């Protein structure tokens, strides 16, 4: 099994080859080194990693948490030394090369309040088409409104960022940071998987070229 220092170097070299800038690489190196310092001496298994990541994230400032989540998720298979899985993720465009800045708040309510204060209303055609299909399929109005609220928050976080699956994935991570319970998190994960094909197929007209990738 590769030493942790070598695993970190391998991850950073990979995202550099994929197009990450020196600033992106440096920021991720710093965060991952903090994570690995906390994991020193631990078994290289799933449980140890998840426990270490929980402690690591709890110690991160709010505005650093999104990048910390991204780093921890992408480094996971390097921690396990599972290079076959790393190659699969690479071929599926599963690694990100941008550190996106999203307006993280302390709660979902705070995020929705920020949306209202800024007057945000910039939603792509995919949202109306998706919600319309739910209505046509007979879904209850309360459930449709719940989904609409979460997806509006997701699109608010995505606004101004590149139209790419990696941006979507990071916005999902950002929105998860605003939820209070594991149950709410699972609900969101199912919702964003369901919405993703609509988001990708029916963007703003200016975004119709260049969409690619899959949502994990």
Image (cartoon, rainbow, N blue to C red):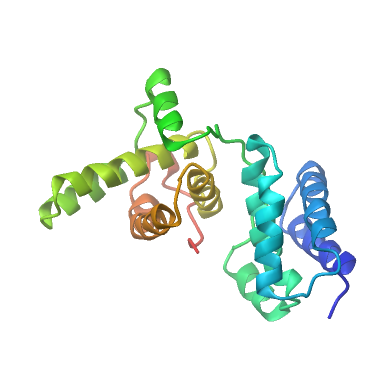
**In what quadrant of the picture does the N terminus appear?**
bottom right
Q: Specify the quadrant of the image occupied by residue 115.
A: top left
Residue at 15% in and 54% down: 139
**Which sits in the foreground, 133 or 105?**
105
Count of marks overlaid on the render: 0
Q: Does residue 98 appear in this view?
A: no
Q: Position of residue 68 (x, y in %)?
A: 68, 49
Q: Position of residue 18 (x, y in %)?
A: 71, 58
Q: Relative to residue 94, is residue 211 depicted above or below? A: above
Left or right relative to 174: residue 202: left
Q: Does residue 189 appear in this view?
A: yes
Left or right relative to 141: residue 157: right
**Which sits in the foreground, 16 or 116?**
116
Left or right relative to 179: residue 61: right
**Which sits in the foreground, 194 or 79?**
79
Residue at 67% in and 49% down: 57
Q: Position of residue 164 (x, y in %)?
A: 52, 50
């Amino acid at each position: 099994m590769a030493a942790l220092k070598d695993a970190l170097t391998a991850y950073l070299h990979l995202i550099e080859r994929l197009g990450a800038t020196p600033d992106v690489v440096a920021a991720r190196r710093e965060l991952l080194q903090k994570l690995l310092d906390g994991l020193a001496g631990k078994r290289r298994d799933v449980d140890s990693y998840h426990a270490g990541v929980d402690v690591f994230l709890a110690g991160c400032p709010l505005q650093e948490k999104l990048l910390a989540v991204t780093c921890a998720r992408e480094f996971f298979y390097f921690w396990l030394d599972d290079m076959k899985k790393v190659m699969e993720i690479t071929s599926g465009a599963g690694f990100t090369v941008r550190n996106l800045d999203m307006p993280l708040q302390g709660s979902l309510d705070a995020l929705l309040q920020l949306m209202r204060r800024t007057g945000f209303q910039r939603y792509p055609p995919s949202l109306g088409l998706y919600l319309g299909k739910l209505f046509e399929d007979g879904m209850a109005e309360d459930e449709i409104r719940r989904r609409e609220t979460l997806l509006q928050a997701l699109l608010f976080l995505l606004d101004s960022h590149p139209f790419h699956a990696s941006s979507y994935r990071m916005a999902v991570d950002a929105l998860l940071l605003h939820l209070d319970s594991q149950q709410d998190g699972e609900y969101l994960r199912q919702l964003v998987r369901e919405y993703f094909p609509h988001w990708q197929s029916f963007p703003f007209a200016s975004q119709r070229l260049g969409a690619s990738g899959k949502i994990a």
